[in-house]
Image (tube, helix red, strand yellow):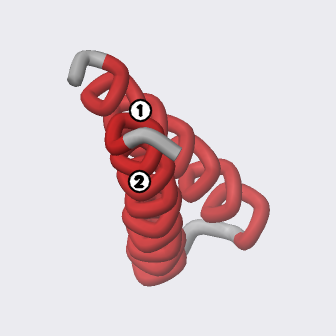
Amino acid sequence: MSDRTAFVLLASALAVIVASMVAVAAGCLARLDQATFPVALIQAAKAFAAALAAALVAVARQ
């Protein structure tokens, strides 16, 4: 495995972990704001997708 492949795999794994933490935080904040569970879940999914897309675009530019 080349260094570039290892870097991309490690950065992608880190991006998924960070995006998951962002989604959990968004869901918790939505619930604290008295949102229903389905609405909080949708907001968490949107935050996960946005964070993952931003991180993977940054990795792709390397």
For disc 1, the neighbor class at 10 Å (few under 14, some 14 to 19, many from 20) is some
Labels in figure, total: 2
Secondary structure state at the residue bearing disc 2: helix
Q: Is 26 displayed left or right of 58 in the figure?
A: right
| Residue in the image at 25% along x and 17% along y | 61
Above or below 56: residue 24:
below
Disc 2 marks a residue whose amino acid type is Ala
Q: Residue furthest top?
A: 61
Disc 1 marks a residue whose amino acid type is Leu
Q: Nearer the viewer, residue 44 or 10?
A: 10
Residue that numbered label 1 is attached to: 56
Q: Nearer the viewer, residue 12 or 31?
A: 12
Q: Residue 35, percent across and down?
A: 58, 67
Q: Residue 28, percent across and down?
A: 47, 79
Q: Residue furthest right?
A: 38
Q: Which mark is residue 6?
A: none
Q: Nearer the viewer, residue 4 or 36?
A: 4
Q: Is 26 displayed left or right of 44 in the figure?
A: left
Image quadrant where residue 39 sits:
bottom right
Asked whether the viewer can see residue 62, the reply is: yes
Residue that numbered label 2 is attached to: 15
Asked whether the viewer can see residue 30, the reply is: no
Tell whether label 1 touches label 2 (CB within 8 Å).
Answer: yes
Q: Nearer the viewer, residue 3 or 23?
A: 3
| Residue in the image at 69% along x and 69% along y | 36
| Residue in the image at 45% along x and 30% along y | 53
Q: Residue 25, percent across and down?
A: 40, 74
Above or below 36: residue 43:
above
| Residue in the image at 49% along x and 49% along y | 9
Q: CA distance from mark 2 to mark 1?
A: 7 Å
